[in-house]
Image: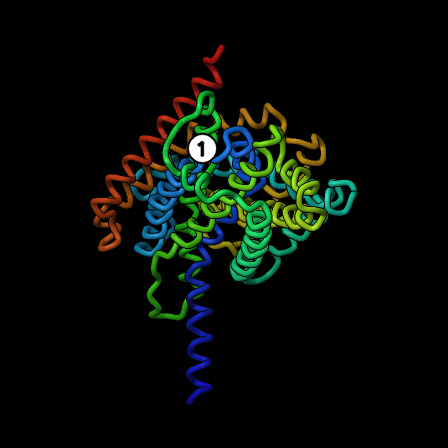
Amino acid sequence: MENTTAASKKYSLKNWLQSLAPGIITAALVFGPSKITIASKLGAVYGFDLLWVVVIAIFFMVVFTSMAARIGIATNQSLLATVKQKWGNKVAIAIGFGVFLVTASFQAGNSIGLGIALAELTHSSPVKWIIIFNGIAIGLLFFRSFYKVLEKLMLGLICLMLLAFLTTLFLSKPDITQVAAGFIPSIPSGSLALVTAFIASSFSIVAAFYQSYLIQERKRLQPAGTIIKDKSFTGIFILGLMTSIVMICASVVLHPQGIKVNNATDMAKAIEPLFGNYASTLFLCGLFGASFSALVGNSSLGGTVLGDALGYGSALHAKANRVIIALIMIIGATIAIVFGKLPLELIVFAQSVTILIVPFIGIAMYAIANDEKIMGVNKNSKAAKIWGAAGLLIIVVLAIESVRTMFFKN
């Protein structure tokens, strides 16, 4: 009887972890080296003053990730298939190519972050690490159940990141009063551009969109009759927690010294004189985890959505989708090796595509989640409608601000 109870508890724990997986994968693909860089920059320049921005960004990320998860639960077809059904094939293809271009453009940053982290750890060239780990990532695609591998990989990397960043937080010993004060809204002079960039990167509609695909991958693997629930909050909470920790550490370590942040390894370099080589090494391990998880997750997102738009289906195990996922990895690795950093022209291009596609995706998700015929009991509640509309307003304002900055700023 005791063995049966133990087995039941073990099975329940396994089921619980699996139910968290879609949200954790989304968190891992959003929390890449660019997120660490911008969070470090916010802390380095403005100290604790902008911690409240994390709460705002994560709140709206939860609203839209939950919306996408409920779409995945309510329907037996992909989100793009539903888009195609409502608005036609051209709209679905436009979204698919838009997501592909965004993920391919920013994939280089993930490869660069990975290469630099391991190069700093081993005092070697980043190029070989970019080649090796992109090769490993492509190798993962050959597993029959790529989604199961993805779940375990992301969970492991999230644990590595949490260990690394929580240890750094413990060593930095922040003032609790100052941390608490940082959650009171205020906008320091000159911070608006950085705040805008941070919210745009943290409140990722493209990543939220992918949540519906991950939920449906989990549905395919669940035993018949198992009820799938939206548990995306845990993953997005972890995203907010790690972002806050990096910002707090930067506020303690970098802000008093006036150290400027140019890339994600600047924090590790600043930590070493204060806390020793062990702390620096652990932080670089966290950076590696963030880079590799974003590299695999980001390419999976772009490849699956484009493959679905082109009619190859929404499953991660579809051969055509795996080819596109590998292509995104190869594009990112090639740019990283050739240029050594993300070219300005590519950043501008990616931002241009994002400006056009993100509001469009957000509106499509919102409209579908409000449709009772499609959603049934999973449709948006009154609160979800209100906060979803507020989130869409933020997305549109960010898009307009980006257009103004990119094309009209003197």
Name the quarter where the N terminus is drawn. bottom left
Q: Is residue 380 left or right of residue 49?
A: left
Q: Residue at x 42, y 66 (%)?
A: 16
Q: Position of residue 264 (x, y in %)?
A: 62, 37
The three-letter code of the residue at mark 1 reads: Asp
Q: Residue at x 44, y 37 (%)?
A: 51
Q: Position of residue 134 (x, y in %)?
A: 66, 47
Relative height, residue 346 to residue 404 (above, below): below
Residue 293 vs residue 252, the one in the foreground: 252
Relative height, residue 42 to residue 380 (above, below): above
Q: Position of residue 117 (x, y in %)?
A: 68, 43
Looking at the rendered structure, the secondary structure element under dot 1 is: loop
Q: Residue at x 45, y 29 (%)?
A: 195
Q: Residue furthest top?
A: 410
Q: Is residue 225 visible?
A: yes
Residue 57 vs residue 397, the one in the foreground: 57
Its colouring scheme is rainbow
Q: Is residue 323 visible?
A: no
Relative height, residue 24 to residue 119 (above, below): below
Q: Residue furthest bottom?
A: 1
Q: Position of residue 287 (x, y in %)?
A: 62, 45
Name the residue beneath numbered marker 1: 49
Q: Is residue 64 left or right of residue 150?
A: left
Relative height, residue 5 to residue 255 (above, below): below
Res 376 quadrant in image: bottom left
Dot 1, crowdedness within 10 Å: few (<14), some or many (≥20)?
many
Q: Is residue 164 left or right of residue 53?
A: right
